[in-house]
Image: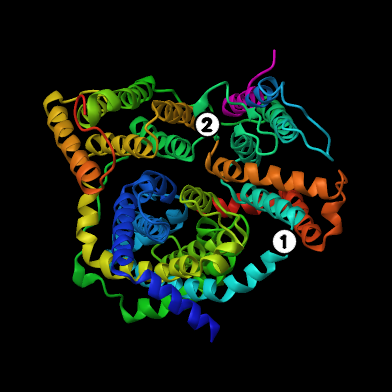
Amino acid sequence: MEIIDHLATGFMAAASLQNLFFCLIGVVLGTLIGVLPGIGPIPALAILLPITFGLNPLSSLIMLAGIYYGAQYGGSTTSILVNMPGEASSVVTCIDGHQMARRGRAGSALAIAALGSFFAGCVGTVFIAAFGPPLSAIAQQFNSPDYFALMLLGLVMAVVLAHGSVLKAVAMVLIGLLLGLVGTDVNTGLTRYTFGISGLWEGIDFLPLVLGLFGIVEVIRNLENPPGERQAISTRLRDLWPTKQEFREAWPAVLRGTGLGSILGILPGGGAVLASFASYTLEKKISRNPRKFGHGAVEGVAGPESANNSAAQTSFIPLLTLGIPSNPIMAIMMGAMIIQGIQPGAAVMTARPELFWGMVASMWIGNLMLVVINLPLLGIWVKLLSVPYRLLYPAILLFCAIGVYSTSTEPFMMVLMIVFSIFGYILLKFGCEPAPLVLGFILGPLMEENLRRSLVMSRGDPTIFLERPISAGLLIATLLMIGMIIFPQFRKTREVAFQEE
Amino acid sequence: MVKVRSPQDLGAGLLFLLIGVSGFVFGRDLTFGSARDMGPGYFPYLISGLIVIIGLITAARALAIDGPPIERVHFRPVIMLMLALAAFGFLIAPAGAVIASMSLVILAAYARRNVNPIETIIFAIGVSAFVVTIFVYALGQPMPVWWGD
């Protein structure tokens, strides 16, 4: 079996002592940051990104993936114990998870979340191993027009699935695209929008941008609206095991959540957030007793938690096979890969199989570590919640500053981070969610290049996008998506779906 | 007299307009080219144009549809945090990680009111010692530690 050979290669690469160590560090640090209320996977990844730069590419990707899962899991812990979602994908966990906690079933809710996530993680790993190679074979057929159409679809999907106003999300994507164009134009060697600043010749640095927009704006936001009383519900380890009844209710939901999440994760624009919302809605719909949702329904924890974890894994598939990030978190992963000198895409799997399969294997190892480490360490995570914010935020700020300095000693990078912090703060005040901007920023140069190549191929004739079956299909899907935004009925369901709180 | 119904949207619309127009103004030297031979200005103009259109729609909607008001801007945290970052950025090369980290932590602490100066200084010393231990000695990042390093 080829799949077993591949996974064996991966486990050989990922199970070296060094890589296991970095996986562990990533998972623990990710959980540590993710547990803090208000810090979801995006700021956590941004804040911890710099410490991975000194490592070799495989170790650093393993550690980043670990941080991502850790942060997501940490967010669920906070949701259940404190009713304070770290980020969008654990909002739904809050609803029933916290209700369970208040009824004294905190340990059980945490254990169900952890075991469900682990199961989903295992399935997600197999999913990537099974679908990665065929998808990357398809990717070999892709040409410039197809890539352009695919990126367009990805951006439109990201807009459809973003929170809040569609119009503002479109603007965020476009502004991201424009910011991505700053620097030297590869075709002519001319500099664009650099204002004569040499620090901008190679484009806007990724790190000051994400740290400013997500890390520092988050700190300012928490200072403006101090998080309320953080009264964690205490839990004892011996209460961790779910009852038979809870087990029986949980496992079908885990199965459904895993399946739903695995599929939604692959879609352009999909990912953990969409998966957890969709799973919650599904569980509520098919339940024989929908009224118990919101009052501590076990399925309301098991389904979404499994769904977001499997989606988190399978959303690596488009990035690793097509080289296109499907959501803002994957955009950050792609930024990190580029900084490491790896251009994500189908070539990675053939040219550097140990890197690709090593990363896939590490995802499974990381998920195992999460279960093994986190449940016993629960006490520590809960204690962390009692660290006063007045001590926490200067440390977070310092971490951001050192992160930027350690990648570039130019004082200009600090100026750039300040500029993006202020920009992010203005966006916050105007009700704009900056996550789609990162996606545009990463895709900007790629889209321009593929558009240029397509039009050179066709001598300026735009119908080339319709002549090729792949790009035509993708464009039709894009149009359908745009139609769905304009079509009022779907708009309503979208609003309802995101207002499940 | 037109009534602003959604101040947030109006602000966002004007911000988008500003960015889109800047895209044209600061890119005015870039040649547009043609579809067959895209110049360096082709894609930027395309994007800037779309941003302007979205900006206009967003601003127009703000006059027609009710929306949330803009929350109060708190200048103190913004200014203090930005000062703290700037201090770190400009101090680290000449003065080293210890002094730069301490200045950042102390300035950042004053983003809140009712600061306890003694706690802040002790915390700053502790954090900068931690930073030097982890980043300089454990991770081996090239970073000056002290004045003149």
Of residues A206 and A397, the one drawn nearer to the viewer in this rendering: A206
Say what secondary structure mark 1 lies in. Answer: loop
Q: Say which residue label 2 marks.
A: A427
| Label at residue A73 | none
Q: Earlier in the sequence, mark 1 or mark 2?
A: 1
Location of residue A191 in the rendering, given as x and y in whole percent from the top left corner: 63, 29
Query: Eyeballing the image, is A82 above or below A116?
Result: above
Compared to residue A227, the image places residue A302 above or below, namely: below
Looking at the rendering, in which quadrant would you find the N terminus of chain B? top right
| As drawn, A96 above or below B121 | below
As drawn, is A128 to the left or to the right of B131?
right
Q: Position of residue A418 (x, y in %)?
A: 42, 27
Residue B4 sits inside the magenta stretch: yes
Indicate the chain on which mark 1 is placed.
A
- Return the chain for callout 2: A
Q: CA distance from mark 1 to mark 2?
A: 36 Å
Tell me the kind of residue under disc 1.
Answer: Phe
Give the camera-side residue of A379 and B2: A379
Q: Position of residue A91 (x, y in %)?
A: 44, 53
Q: Which residue is mark 1?
A: A142
**Residue A150 in magenta?**
no
Residue B138: percent from the left, percent from the top?
A: 21, 48
Looking at the image, residue B109 sits to the left or right of residue A76; the answer is left
Looking at the rendered structure, the kind of residue marked 2 is Leu
**Element under disc 2:** helix
Relative side of A201 to A156, left or right: left
Of residue B77 and residue A96, the one placed in the foreground of this image is B77
Q: Which residues are magenta?
A: B1-18
